[in-house]
């Protein structure tokens, strides 16, 4: 199969998968009963309730309701969030920016540290540093993210007072405009160094917490693919022509070892989306994750549906991009099922 | 082909030899598994955890009427570790942290055993049907699996548990609904691989029934990756279950590690570090132990990954 055909096929499958996800999500929320409750109050009569049901098409059969819901989603109407007391679509952008900012800095932590650790261990295979790295990686994969965050808070916030919780210091946040919702970008646009430092200062602990789990996934993959590359003939050839070991590693082995490592980045994105919920609770980060956590505890259906749908879209797109990059980078990849 | 009275029957192997070969192989496998120090370390932690769960009623006085509910000692609120009768301190509401840790091991054991066994059975069944039958049924089942895999598992479980209503039972149920998919996919791939072996063709030519071939020739040879995955999941499920209860999907006041970490959170600003730290450490050790054993098992069962 040609790469182009492969991409086209994947793009056709993508909306079908999303449709499946939306059916699952919709059926799930309807198991809990009619969502009419959000619009009701105690003094309403039966006739009024019926009127409301008719207005939102809740008196129709389920497949018809699904159709109306899906139509709403396509028009940007995701329903009313009980937790935020506002339409989901109105609250979403600001929270999305907060979560994205945190996820991106965490991804930087995860990728930088993961690649470094994986290379470090792979070069020193079966020596002490390798064993230590392996233990660190297994530990990171077993670490409850929410507990790790709390430990950091106990040490660096409660005891040492070095780092704050929350996303910003109130006065500084209010002193600049927020056109993008990304605090770092906003502070650079406003030309305020105080705001930039404030943004970075608040990002340190949550980014380490969220990024650390991703380190394990990336480091292990990098290590094993580097070991495989170092056994290849071209590495011997590079050494034989007298290239210094540092360059053999940098220009040849490491570059090729990155190819399989790209595949786990999709996994890391799912990991970040999931971890963001706990990290945002602990660090009082006003993002999508904490919103979802509140919605989950209080049964806010519209928010739950939107969040699940959104993360699935992101997850599927990330995997698609990763697969395409992988197929492009490594021509040996068999395209097909 | 599958006529039982057919003269072409599977020649019965000399039973004793087969048994001896099998025993020798399991012996070799055990030696191989136990030669890895990190695997032994994992085994030791698991054994300690299991004995803690088993002897819970003798280690602490069970809370009446429900031992899975944290006992409240209103005379000893927020006590630091080292307090008499409360060696690991107490929570904001006077719950003994040590009690929570010990009975929490039972809660975690229940959670992981129920979820792993249910999902392995469902996943193996569905994966086997898809792999054995093939065709349209395979296509339909695998498209369903694809849809399930499109939602990140923690978020999926979170949404299901939220909609079923907050309770520990619903956490178990939601994890069962999410985790079977992985096994179905692994099993299907394995079956398709094993089916291509000559000995399967041989059995078919001999006139064995499809069910017989499946149970005697295919399933035992396809099970390895499922066993490894199940071991890893014994840890992962406690990790995810604790995350769900940390977020607030379990009843408050139960002896469960995630709930304890969550309840301890409120005290850290005032320096009460113990109520979150110890239960969280248990979740970490539990997951770590099963990860180590799962890795060791994979290395021993699949020589290709050795030393990687």
Image (tube, coloured by chain):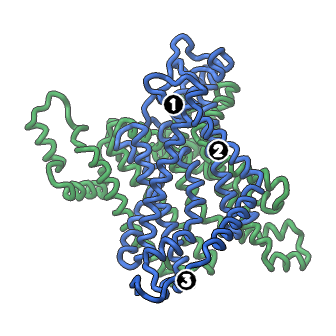
Chain colours: A green, B blue
- On the image, the x and y values in percent for residue B46 come to 65, 44
Residue A264 percent across, percent down from the top left = 60, 62
Query: Do the residues indicated by labels 3 and 1 lie within the same chain of the protein?
Result: yes
Question: Gap between marks 3 and 2, in whole Å?
Answer: 43 Å
Asked whether the residues under marks 2 and 1 belong to the same chain, the reply is yes
| Mark 3 and mark 1 residues within 8 Å of each other at the beta carbon | no
Q: Nearer the viewer, residue A248 or B251?
A: B251
State the residue position of label 2.
B46
Q: Secondary structure at mark 1?
A: loop
In the image: residue B99, left or right of residue A109: left
The chain that hosts pointer 3 is B
Whether residue A7 is situated above or below residue A134 in the rendered picture: below
| Residue position marked by numbered label 3 in the rendering | B11
Residue, far left: A47
Mark 3 and mark 2 lie on one chain; the one further toward the N terminus is 3
Depth check: A104 or B28 in front? Answer: B28
Give the chain of mark 2.
Answer: B
Helix, strand or loop at label 3? It is: loop
């Amino acid at each position: 199969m040609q790469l182009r055909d492969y991409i086209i096929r994947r793009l056709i499958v993508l909306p079908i998968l999303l449709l499946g996800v939306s059916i699952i999500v919709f059926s799930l929320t309807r198991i809990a009963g009619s969502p009419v409750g959000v619009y009701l109050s105690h003094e309403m009569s039966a006739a009024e309730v019926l009127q409301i049901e008719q207005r939102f098409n809740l008196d129709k059969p389920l497949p018809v309701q699904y159709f109306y819901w899906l139509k709403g989603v396509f028009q940007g109407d995701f329903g009313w969030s009980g937790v935020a007391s506002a339409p989901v679509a109105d609250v979403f952008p600001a929270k999305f920016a907060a979560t994205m900012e945190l996820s991106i800095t965490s991804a930087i932590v995860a990728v930088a540290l993961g690649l470094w650790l994986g290379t470090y261990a792979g070069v020193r295979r079966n020596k002490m540093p390798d064993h230590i790295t392996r233990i660190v990686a297994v530990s990171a994969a077993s670490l409850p993210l929410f507990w790790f965050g709390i430990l950091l808070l106990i040490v660096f916030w409660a005891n040492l007072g070095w780092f704050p919780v929350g996303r910003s210091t109130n006065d500084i946040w209010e002193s600049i405009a927020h056109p993008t919702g990304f605090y770092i970008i906003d502070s650079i646009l406003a030309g305020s160094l105080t705001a930039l430092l404030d943004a970075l200062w608040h990002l340190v602990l949550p980014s380490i917490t969220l990024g650390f789990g991703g380190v394990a996934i990336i480091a292990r993959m990098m290590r094993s693919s580097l070991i495989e590359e170092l056994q290849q003939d071209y590495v011997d050839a590079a050494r034989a022509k007298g290239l210094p070991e540092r360059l053999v590693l940098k220009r040849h082995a490491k570059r090729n070892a990155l190819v399989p490592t790209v595949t786990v980045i999709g996994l890391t994105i799912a990991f970040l989306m999931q971890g963001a919920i706990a990290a945002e609770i602990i660090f009082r980060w006003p993002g999508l994750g904490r919103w979802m956590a509140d919605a989950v505890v209080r049964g806010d259906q519209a928010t739950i549906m939107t969040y699940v749908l959104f993360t699935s879209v992101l997850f599927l797109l990330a995997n698609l991009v990763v697969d395409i990059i992988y197929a492009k980078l490594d021509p040996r990849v068999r395209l097909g099922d | 082909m599958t006529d039982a009275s057919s003269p072409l029957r599977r020649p019965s192997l000399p039973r004793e030899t087969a048994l001896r070969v099998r025993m020798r192989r399991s012996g070799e496998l055990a030696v191989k598994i136990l030669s890895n120090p990190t695997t032994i370390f994992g085994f030791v932690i698991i054994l300690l955890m299991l004995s803690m769960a088993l002897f819970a009623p003798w280690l602490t006085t069970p809370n009446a009427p429900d031992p899975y509910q944290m006992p409240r000692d209103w005379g000893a609120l927020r006590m630091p570790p080292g307090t008499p009768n409360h060696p690991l301190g107490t929570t904001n509401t006077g719950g003994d942290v040590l009690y929570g840790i010990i009975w929490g091991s039972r809660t975690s054991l229940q959670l992981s055993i129920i979820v792993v066994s249910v999902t392995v059975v469902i996943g193996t069944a569905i994966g086997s049907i898809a792999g054995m039958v093939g065709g349209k049924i395979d296509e339909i089942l695998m498209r369903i699996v694809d849809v399930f895999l499109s939602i990140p598992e923690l978020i999926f479980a979170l949404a299901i548990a939220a909609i079923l209503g907050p309770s520990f039972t619903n956490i178990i149920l939601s994890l069962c609904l999410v985790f079977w998919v992985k096994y179905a996919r692994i099993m299907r791939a394995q079956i398709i691989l094993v089916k291509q072996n000559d000995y399967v063709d041989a059995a078919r030519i001999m006139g064995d029934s499809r069910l017989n071939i499946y149970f005697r020739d295919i399933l035992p040879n396809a099970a390895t990756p499922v066993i490894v995955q199940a071991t890893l999941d014994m840890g992962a499920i406690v990790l995810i279950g604790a995350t769900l209860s940390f977020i607030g999907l379990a009843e408050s006041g139960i002896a469960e590690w995630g709930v304890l970490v969550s309840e301890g959170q409120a005290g850290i600003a005032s320096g009460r570090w113990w109520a979150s730290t110890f239960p969280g450490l248990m979740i970490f050790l539990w997951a770590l132990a099963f990860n180590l054993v799962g890795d060791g098992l994979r290395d021993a069962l699949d020589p290709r990954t050795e030393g990687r």
